Amino acid sequence: MEFTKMHGLGNDFVIVSKYKDIPKDVERLAIAMCDRHFGVGADGLVFILPSDQADVRMRIFNADGTEAEQCGNAIRCVSKYVYDHELVNKEKLSVETLAGIQHVKLHTKEGIVNTVEVDMGEPILKGELVPTAIHDPQVVDRTIEVDGVTFHFTAVSMGNPHAVIYVENAKDFDVEKWGPKIETHPLFPKKTNVEFVTVKSDKELEMRVWERGVGQTLACGTGACATGVASVLTGQASRDVTIHLKGGDLKVFWNPEDNKVYMTGEAREVFTGNWLAPVEF
Ligand SMILES: N[C@@H](CCC[C@H](N)C(=O)O)C(=O)O
């Protein structure tokens, strides 16, 4: 099975594009391919599939084999891939995901994709829809107890769940210790991605992320969008921010006119290869 390795700010994916549907044992395949010692090594396995509602359809499986509803960095990679490989010959395209259809604008210069801008849709704030166990219209600056320590979190879904937590110094924060405990906390019935954020200014935020089904990653597109939204809701930043992640920067704009979140950043293709073990479709 041919694959391409891509990343968005170091959040890396194995991309498979030549099939009409996902393979039979996709959970096991995702675990095997994403393994950094015995496989290709990636945070997720992504399938680009035909769609009857959009230009292409994307399905994303985390490194632990679970399927995610949405992935911001993967949408940018998929959009660049289909343009570069001439599967879609236009700079404005649409990508169907489990969380809905996302509209994408490729910023190109002389046919080369520089950055990718994605309309990530409206954030979901109702507690039961994020989902959290708190069934309020918004879950903003609430407390969560973990091993006797109290954190404050804001819950935002960008199609997938996020808990945004402000800390004094995100750079030094022990993401590996607290991330998995919050990911699996009973407050989050479908588990959650967790962002640890430090506000640098009205326009700049520093973010580290613990991803559901993966672990600590270098960047998370939906996490950056959730952080942008949470920072407006908590009155700490403007609607137009730059988010500094371990793997690079993302621009996030929560538009007051249409209530949608726009994310802009890079996507890179790294190498192509052949997966030698048999895969059944
Ligand atoms: N890295 C992604 C999010 C991938 C899915 C996530 N781990 C989940 O389970 O929700 C992004 O860039 O948004």
Image: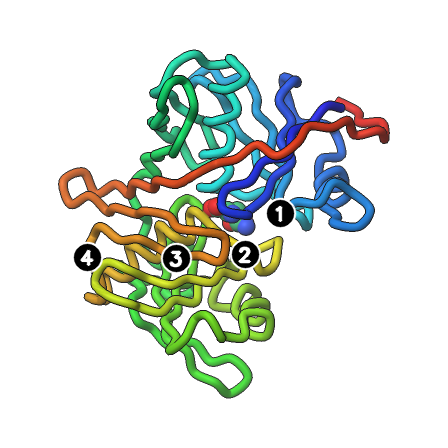
Towards the viewer: 4 or 132: 4
Q: How far is disc 3 from disc 1 in space, using C-alphas? A: 19 Å
Towards the viewer: 200 or 62: 200
Q: How far is disc 3 from disc 4 in space, using C-alphas? A: 15 Å
Q: Which residue is mark 3?
A: 244
Q: Which residue is mark 1?
A: 43
Work out which quarter of the rendered image holds the N terminus and state it. Answer: top right
| Camera-nearest label, 3 or 1 | 3
Q: Which residue is mark 4?
A: 238
User: Residue 212 vs residue 139: left or right?
Assistant: right
Q: Which residue is mark 2?
A: 211
> What is the secondary structure assignment of the residue under circle 2?
strand
| Camera-nearest label, 3 or 4 | 3
Residue 162: x and y in percent read 43, 57
Kind of residue indicated by mark 2: Glu
Residue 105: x and y in percent read 33, 27
Work out which quarter of the rendered image holds the C terminus and state it. Answer: top right
